Image: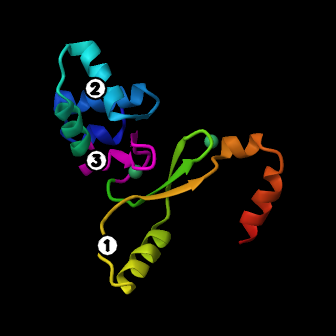
Amino acid sequence: MHCRALGVRLTAQRKEVLELLLRRGGSAKAYDLQDDMRARHGRVAPSTVYRALEFLMDQHLVHRVDALNTFIVCNAEHAAHHPLLLVCSNCEAVTELHDDKAYEAVQKTLRQAGAGFVESEIEVKGTCGKCRSQKPGAERETAATAKG
Ligand SMILES: [Zn+2]
Ligand SMILES: [Zn+2]
């Protein structure tokens, strides 16, 4: 069980959705979770899964990845945070990073542009560490990134 989940009051259903998400390696689509629920309980309304996911997202235990239309289990230890989600364009793995300064900068830029800022995750497309290490020429890229 997710350590931070212990501090949150979860109904059996919400707990089960989080558990199923963890069982799928911490990342899944809503309908996969619905299938898992159905396998266990028979008929399950899609809204049951979505409502549980919404609650878990409000608690920052789960994040939605819009680029992939998936949900991931949060890896942060504190409740309030601004995740920077790196979505690998090769293997679709999602890595949760935290960079409050980058988040504040985006927030500031949007405000300066007169745009309304919505509290949200920031998604960045890239190549995960695993894929980069398998790609020839990855070392040179790493050096360039470290400089900038
Ligand atoms: Zn998180
Ligand atoms: Zn990858």
Q: Does the magenta segment cover residue 74? A: yes
Identify the mark at residue 117; answer none if there is no mark.
1
The spot of residue 57 in percent (x, y) is 28, 47
Residue pointed to by mark 3: 57
Q: Give the image location of residue 99, x and y in percent.
A: 49, 64
Residue positioned 23% across, 44% down in the render: 54
Q: Quadrant of residue 119?
A: bottom left
In the rendered structure, does residue 90 fall within the stretch colored magenta? no
Question: Which residue is pictured at 63% across the width and 42% down the height?
Answer: 90
* Apparent side of residue 8 relative to residue 119 in the rendered image (left or right): left
Depth check: give the residue in front, 4 or 75.
Answer: 75
- Residue 34 — which label? 2
Mark count: 3
Classify 10 Å Cα crowding around label 3: few (below 14), some (14-19), many (20 and above): some
The Cα–Cα distance between marks 2 and 1, rounded to whole angstroms, is 32 Å
What is the quadrant of the N terminus in the image? top left
What sort of colour scheme is used for the picture? rainbow
Q: Nearer the viewer, mark 3 or mark 1?
A: 1
